[in-house]
Image (tube, coloured by chain):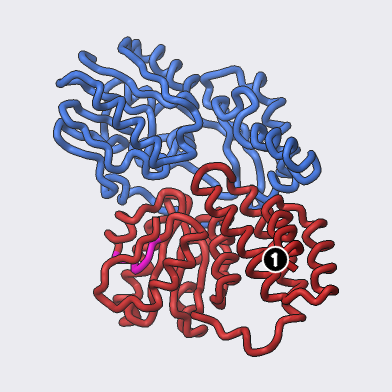
Chain colours: A blue, B red
Amino acid sequence: MEHAIVIACQMLEHEIRAALRDTGLTCPVTWLERELHNRPDHLREVLQEEIDKAPPGTTVLLAYAQCGNAAVGLEAHSAKLVLPRFADCVHLFRSERVGDPGQVDCRTLYLSPGFLEERSGILKDYDRYCGKWGPEKARRVCRMMVKNYRAVSLMDTHAADLEAYAPRCRDYAELLGLSLERCEGSYRVLCKLFGGQWDEEFVVVPPGGAIDMAEFMGMPRAAGML
Amino acid sequence: MADYLTQIEAAVYDGDEDLVVELVEKALADGVDPEAIIQDGGVAALNRLGDDFNNMIAFLPELMIGGECMKKLIEMCSPHLQGGKSAFKGKIVIGCAKGDLHDIGKSLVATQLSINGYEVVDLGTDVPTNKFIDTAMAEKADIIAVSSLLTTSQYYMEELINRLSHEGKRDLFKVAVGGGPIGPEYAEKIGADGYSRTAALAVKMADRLLDKKPGDPLVSEV
């Protein structure tokens, strides 16, 4: 693919590197901080800044998804934008075939290896709360945050050695008082993104266009508890 | 008295429930006005937490723990309140949209509205559109408030508004929306009446919504 760049979420680094390797795509990759998804409005600003840096005629491959509406409103300007048409990376990884929205149980906290790098997410929050309230209350607060969840599920996207992440995932489950499960994932959508196979699973925006929320309206809605 | 209120405000702000209980017990025993304890102690602390949240000094857990302290404080003060103070400004049916179990923000809004004069009927999480409408009708609510953190659930907000219109009930209720991915643009697009970025601002939004007439522009608090 000529004149392409990738704007990539660090949370998906293992899967993105695997897909780049598998497809043989060599192009500049800009990695954006993993926790930007916590603030969709800010993520949108950062993504737009990166898109605006692309020279005219560039195809910008966004290794993201709708991400809390962070992608909605992004403007292509002189570039072409391509974005997976999924609600978030969990749906993207859990999608098995074209048209499959991804099997996602809303009471399960899915953790792919990227979510388990270092002491991030809730484990990092726990450390902060310990300093403020002590370990007992810190644990109670963490459990309050996920009280409607049922399980933590370690997702094998086949892009990293899962066993290396299993202990930290167990820490998550124990801290949160949730059962520990495993599930399958796949980076096939990222391979299609980097391989130029942009079918209905992708939003493709020509130069001058913008990503409209309507692009995601056709996706299946949340079905409630399984 | 002022000293008690200052200390109670600080204890609620710090999320120290044991200290809140101790101070409120002492204050009530010393004859401090329970309404002052609620307003100048608890509400003031939650407002300060709300401001700090907007400025990214405090985060959701601090608001949650502060809210828990507030509930305890109200539980202790309520039996001491004089009658006649309970006239509500309005009634709100609130819940998370279908498929969404993330209720921290919704519960913070419910707490803020409760302590600021609203009667709140909290339907919890994963609430079907029918249930919002049926409950609002049965309760003769003024406002239906829907929260969604998931983009896959946000579409049910639009469905609610369309259903109300279709059933000829649109003018019976004001519809307010909010949640992580929801912005004022989306609220306006789907024809909602109100939008609030934070729990603290939701009270101001609700106050304005009560005066909103059909056809008036979106009441937005950001």
Residue type at the position of mark 1: Lys
Q: Quadrant of residue B3?
A: bottom right
The location of residue B79, given as percent across then percent down, is 76, 80
**B121, A41: nearer the viewer:** A41
Q: Which chain does tag 1 point to?
A: B
> Which image quarter holds the N terminus of chain A?
top left
Kindly identify the residue that appears in the image at 60 percent across and 17 percent down: A161
Kindly identify the residue that appears in the image at 65 percent across and 26 percent down: A119
> Which image quarter holds the C terminus of chain A?
bottom right
Kindly identify the residue that appears in the image at 19 percent across and 26 percent down: A79
The location of residue B29, given as percent across then percent down, is 85, 74
* Residue A131, above or below A26: below
The location of residue A39, given as percent across then percent down, is 45, 40
- SS assignment at label 1: helix
Q: Number of callouts in the render?
A: 1
Q: Can residue B101 be seen at all in this image of the molecule?
A: no
**A92, A127: nearer the viewer:** A127
Give the magenta range.
B191-195
* Residue B95, above or below B19: below
Q: Can residue B200 be seen at all in this image of the molecule?
A: yes
Relative to A52, A169 lies left or right? right
Q: Is residue A103 magenta?
A: no
Residue underneath mark 1:
B71
The location of residue B186, given as percent across then percent down, is 32, 55
**B135, B84: nearer the viewer:** B84
Q: Main secondary structure of the magenta part?
A: loop
Q: Quadrant of residue A40?
A: top left
Q: Is residue B192 magenta?
A: yes
* Residue A190, above or below B7: above
